[in-house]
């Protein structure tokens, strides 16, 4: 059984890792044709927000799946 502190630490690390992975993947996409002239800063902020949303969503899925797997022991 994991303590609340261990779960919190695992969640923080998971979110950071998946946000980093998402950031690396999003950097491979060429957004230049989609950006209007003079709106570079807004585009970078949008990409940052998209990275956080996608990375956090994937991390939550991973953490929930892990929790569900641990909860299966209560089935029997």
Image: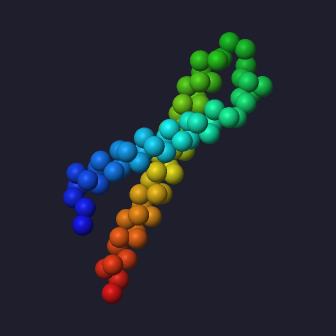
Name the residue: 50% across, 49% down: 57
Residue 7 percent across, percent down from the top left: 29, 54
Q: Is residue 51 above or below residue 39?
A: below
Residue 65 percent across, percent down from the top left: 45, 64
- Residue 53 in view in this figure: no
**In which quadrant will I find the N terminus?**
bottom left
* Picture colour scheme: rainbow
Q: Quadrant of residue 33?
A: top right
Q: 3 or 44: which is nearer to us?
A: 3
Name the residue: 66% across, 17% down: 39
Give left or right: position of 36 versus 42: right
Residue 48 percent across, percent down from the top left: 54, 31
Q: Residue furthest right?
A: 33
Q: Is residue 40 above or below residue 13?
A: above
Give left or right: position of 44 versus 3: right
Give left or right: position of 23 versus 59: right
Name the residue: 63% across, 24% down: 43
- Residue 56 in view in this figure: yes
**In which quadrant will I find the C terminus?**
bottom left
Name the residue: 37% across, 45% down: 13
Q: Is residue 3 above or below residue 20?
A: below
Q: Residue furthest bottom?
A: 76
């Amino acid at each position: 059984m994991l303590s609340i502190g261990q779960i919190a630490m695992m969640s923080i690390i998971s979110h950071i890792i998946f946000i980093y992975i998402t950031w690396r993947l999003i950097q491979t996409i060429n957004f230049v044709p989609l950006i209007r002239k003079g709106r570079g800063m807004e585009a970078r902020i949008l990409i940052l927000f998209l990275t956080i949303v996608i990375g956090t969503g994937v991390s939550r899925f991973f953490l929930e799946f892990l929790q569900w797997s641990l909860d299966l022991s209560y089935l029997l």
